[in-house]
């Protein structure tokens, strides 16, 4: 006579049936805990890109019209699970029409640091002799394009720096 593993109505389940059910429940729990994150990774879109961060770097009234000003700032960058605080610089120029422009600190030729030469009224890269005017345009040297610019806005007299935008214009 064959015995059935299913409990008969009114009788409690056997020990064997209890263990089989527990093993299936543990297997289902492990499968769900491993499978659901994998399914979410494959089918859900990645996190939305955070909006551009604006960093306050100083007072707009502190800029003079006759010479560029180098300003330093700190920006937090997320690298995986670490948050890194980086120091950066920008060259700010106030034009005669009171427009303010912020240039990135690297030459567009090979990324060397340039400086403002007061005697020549030009930005000069000492490594490869690239020369830029106060508007960031190439006037001499091997640099292929004008200086890169930061997004910049003025709120309540305070300067706020955004993302660095690469200039796309080639040297004429």
Image (cartoon, rainbow, N blue to C red):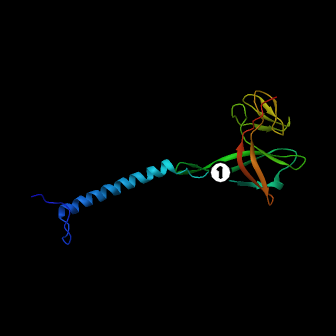
Q: Residue at x 30, y 58 (%)?
A: 26
Residue 56 lies, in percent from the top left, at: 72, 55
130 and 162: which is toward the camera? 162
The count of marks equals: 1
| Residue sticking out furthest to the right | 96
Q: Is residue 46 above or below residue 16?
A: above
Residue 68 lies, in percent from the top left, at: 82, 44
Residue 168 lies, in percent from the top left, at: 75, 36
Q: Is residue 127 above or below residue 44?
A: above
Q: Residue at x 40, y 51 (%)?
A: 35
| Residue sticking out furthest to the bottom | 10
Residue 6 lies, in percent from the top left, at: 20, 62
Could you tell me which secondary element the residue under label 1 belongs to? strand
Q: Quadrant of the N terminus?
A: bottom left
Q: Quadrant of the C terminus?
A: top right
Instruction: Identify residue for label 1.
Output: 75
52 and 105: which is toward the camera? 52
Q: Residue at x 12, y 57 (%)?
A: 2
In the displayed structure, does residue 151 sit left or right of residue 31?
right
| Residue sticking out furthest to the front | 1
In the displayed structure, does residue 3 sit left or right of residue 122?
left
């Amino acid at each position: 006579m064959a015995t059935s593993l299913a409990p008969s109505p009114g009788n409690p389940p056997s020990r064997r049936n209890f263990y089989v059910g527990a093993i299936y429940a543990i297997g289902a729990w492990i499968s769900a805990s491993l499978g659901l994150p994998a399914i979410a990774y494959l089918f859900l879109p990645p996190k939305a890109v955070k909006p551009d961060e604006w960093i306050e770097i100083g007072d707009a009234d502190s800029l003079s019209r006759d010479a560029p000003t180098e300003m330093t700032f700190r920006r937090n960058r997320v690298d995986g699970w670490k948050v890194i605080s980086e120091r950066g610089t920008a060259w700010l120029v106030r034009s005669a029409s009171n427009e303010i422009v912020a240039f990135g600190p690297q030459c567009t030729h090979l990324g060397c640091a340039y400086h403002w030469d007061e005697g020549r009224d030009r930005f000069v890269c000492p490594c490869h002799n690239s020369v830029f005017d106060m508007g960031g345009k190439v006037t001499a040297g091997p640099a292929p394009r004008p200086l890169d610019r930061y997004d910049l806005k003025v709120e309540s007299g305070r300067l706020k720096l955004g993302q660095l935008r690469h200039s796309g214009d080639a040297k004429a």
